[in-house]
Amino acid sequence: MTRFTTPTHTFKTPVDLTDAPAIYISYKQYKKIILEKDKDHIEVRPDALVVTLTQEETGRFIAGDNPVEIQVRARLDNGKSIVSGIFRASVNPVLKEGVI
């Protein structure tokens, strides 16, 4: 992922989360949550979750050797909760900082 871009992340799901009352996609770097998207900001499909980050959001990440960790969590309509494995994405720098 490159800073100050607008990537779209698609997470395939083995469970239909369309009716899940709570869904979160968390982005963590340097041991703290930098960004979190909730169900209101996620496109929920029967087989996938889709989220697009803004330039401002990707600008919060620090380029270098420490990747961003990404994890999906959801609470199902029956009260059970599920969690994905942790995905890792490297962060690439830009020559000129800032939103365009």
Image (cartoon, grey):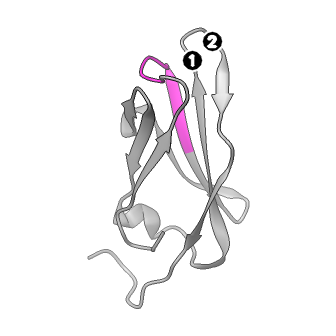
Crowding at dot 1, Cα within 10 Å, few <14 / some 14-19 / many 20+, comes out as: some
Counting from the top left corner in percent of width and height, residue 41 is at 38, 39
Residue lying farthest right? 31
Question: 68 left or right of 17?
Answer: right
Q: Give the range drawn in magenta.
A: 17-25
Counting from the top left corner in percent of width and height, residue 55 is at 36, 66
The disc at residue 79 is 2
Identified at 45% across, 70% down, the residue is 59
Q: Quadrant of residue 76?
A: top right
Identified at 66% across, 16% down, the residue is 80
Q: On screen, 26 above or below 31?
A: above
Counting from the top left corner in percent of width and height, residue 64 is at 62, 81
Q: On screen, 61 above or below 9?
A: below
Crowding at dot 2, Cα within 10 Å, few <14 / some 14-19 / many 20+, comes out as: few
Kindly report the distance in space between the C-alpha atoms of the residues bearing marks 2 and 1: 5 Å
Q: Name the residue under label 1.
A: 76
> Please, what is the three-letter code of the amino acid marked with disc 1?
Leu
Identified at 48% across, 69% down, the residue is 1
Identified at 34% across, 63% down, the residue is 6
> Please, what is the three-letter code of the amino acid marked with disc 2?
Gly
Q: In which quarter of the image is residue 89?
A: bottom right
Residue closer to the observer: 25 or 31:
25
Residue closer to the observer: 8 or 100:
8
Disc 1, SS: loop
Residue lying farthest left? 100
Disc 2, SS: loop
Question: Number of labelled discs?
Answer: 2
Q: Do the residues labelled 2 and 1 touch (CB within 8 Å)?
A: yes
